[in-house]
Amino acid sequence: MARFSHSSRQSAALPGWIAAELRQIAAVARAPQWWASLGVALALWALAYQVAPTIRLDVGGDRETRRRGFDSPFLINFNDSEPADLPDRPWYAADSLPYRWTRTISSVVFPGAGGDHWLLRVTAASGRPDGSAVRSVWRTANGSSITLDIAAQRRMYAILARTDPAGDLRVTFETPRLIAPSDPRILGLPVFRIVATPAQPAPYRPAWVMSGWLALSLAGMYALTRRTCAPLRHATRASAGMVATVALLAAWMIAVRRTDATVLAPTVAVWIWVAYALVPFVEAALRATQPTADAVTAAGLTAVAWFVRVAGMLHPYAQTSDLGLHVNNLADVARGTIFFTEGLPCRAGAGPQPYLPGGYLALLPVVLLTGADRAALTLLVQAGTALLESLTVAVLWLLLRRTDTGRTASLYAAAIYALAPPILRSYSVGEMANLLAQALVAPLILWMTLALRDHSWKMTFTGAALILLILLSHGGVALSAGAALAVWFLFSLVQPDSGTSAEGAQSAANTPRISQIRRMSAWRLAIAIGAAGIVAFTLFYSAFGYVAEERRIAQEALAAQGIICPPGDPLLDKLNRWVIGFVFSPGAPLPSLALAAGVAGALLAGQPRSGALRLTLAACWLGALASLGTLLFSDQPVRWTIFIYPALCIGAGVALAQWQRHGRAGATLALTVTLFLIWYGAADWVRQVSEYLR
């Protein structure tokens, strides 16, 4: 009966909670500052639309920049880009210009183009093998059409097109199908390039629908910033600065890179509000364990981290190589397949490798609720992985708060991790299994820190459960975590008590007994973790006894073809590529400034209640170094930059907080370093999304 009463109270509290959140949004919406900012933003965007840019779409790819795929968001029902890459000739070195075949009905759409009349110059050819022309009907948004005889040779055809009421520029090509016995595709005509220029002088009509998407995006960012910065000083200035920055950036892009802005605006407008909806849930969870005012700031930074990841993955320009693999694996797990393997690259040794299902099992409850539609599974893998991994931001804040390191250090660490370059790059590649396991690294660091002071059985079982989950989620993360745990275990045996636990408060006469209790606790933890490893081996790894033999066979088969796997590069070359290059090369995923701040903070984390934190950070760094030992027998290491980044952010947060205490100069230095690292992560993410697989 008591349980039922508690459930009823929770159900009754939920509508009140939702109403309170809606009242907060309404309060933000009623603020005069917001309406003034929105008015200025709309005026700026209307002025930006008076610039007459030339929109150029290199269909099939741009040979000058050697990149392709940027045309995909604007083309509807076109075939894939041609020519294809050949082993001895990349596509941009082919004799013919890049192109795409239309189908019988295909369209090109430039969303948010604005204006009224545009002159479109379309470079096309008939594509008929016999050299004949083809009659094609081209229709514009206002319903007008023109019939053109497209010659066999590549030529430019100019038509006048009008934007639709939403401000989008659209042209549809209707072409008879080319019957090619050796090609099952539906082929209309090849299109090489489309160039659009305004056909009339200013003033130009803004695309008000697109302006609405931008305004909705701006409103979400403003609300999220106000909610996140509420406990901080100058929250109003921060919100105003964010609105001004975003409004100016959007105006510049409308004037200079219009299609890049308009193609992304709807995605941002939708997902920024989904991110805002995450804040109260994360805040409630954090306040339940650490009831401080800045919990909402940590929750907001978590939402920002999730939004940045999802917006990048769902960007219309984004391409990925491994996402489909994880969607298929999740579908297999939903059907009951738990034991499966994937092929290793040659640098890692080639042959099959057990693929751990732990991350997919974490997403499985949502699959059971939503079904196994492929589009839904793809979105679940992207958004679900991003949510679990983004919670690292909240865990880092919680760890530094629980160790009394201070609000400033915790917020610095959370902000830096929100745009972690190596993590964001993994999303672009599609390394979802690694990222799902990475979501457990920050909880592991939290556990290691607390376990040095708390020797209870509850802490022991929690650690064993964490290790079991990591062992069943990703082999590389498990290897790095195991190395860090081994170092941490040695530290727990030889280091003196931190002085913050109940045992540490006893008199000096009880010191031998305290040391004995600590050693017994450490061995108890080791036994529990060993038991977790035995369980993982029994439940999963024991089913793959055949893998070693299959890998040997695969390596011998490749060797017979003259391919040695792994190639056996010199150790110094591997260290230069995978370690030095990942820190000191231009555009490195691990900026050297972040590395320096992280190491400095690890050395500084020695306050009375954070001595355990220093030992944990040292264990993480030494464990990451130890995991590079895989380079002795493999040409590809574990993802050490991803594993170490939470510990790096913790150390950086501690170092920046220490610097900030040294007057105005120290505060300026700390803020400058933080903004630089955030900017570096954002710029690297933009570059990764726009350049990967191009």
Image (spheres, rainbow, N blue to C red):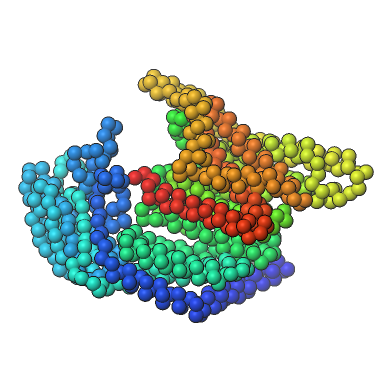
Considering depth in this image, is 516 or 406 the residue closer to the camera? 406
**Residue at image coords 45%, 75%:** 37
**Residue at image coords 45%, 49%:** 684
Considering depth in this image, is 45 or 352 the residue closer to the camera? 45
Farthest-out residue, top = 560
Report the side of 558 relative to 134 (left or right). right
Please say whether residue 270 is visible from this viewpoint: no
> Which x, y percent locates residue 270?
43, 65
Report the side of 464 relative to 633 (left or right). right
Considering depth in this image, is 465 or 308 the residue closer to the camera? 308
> Which x, y percent locates residue 565?
45, 25
Q: Quadrant of the C terminus?
A: top left
> Which x, y percent locates residue 194?
21, 56
**Residue at image coords 47%, 39%:** 585
- Does residue 504 sit above or below 18 in this rendering? above
Considering depth in this image, is 659 or 156 the residue closer to the camera? 659
> Which x, y percent locates residue 377?
44, 52
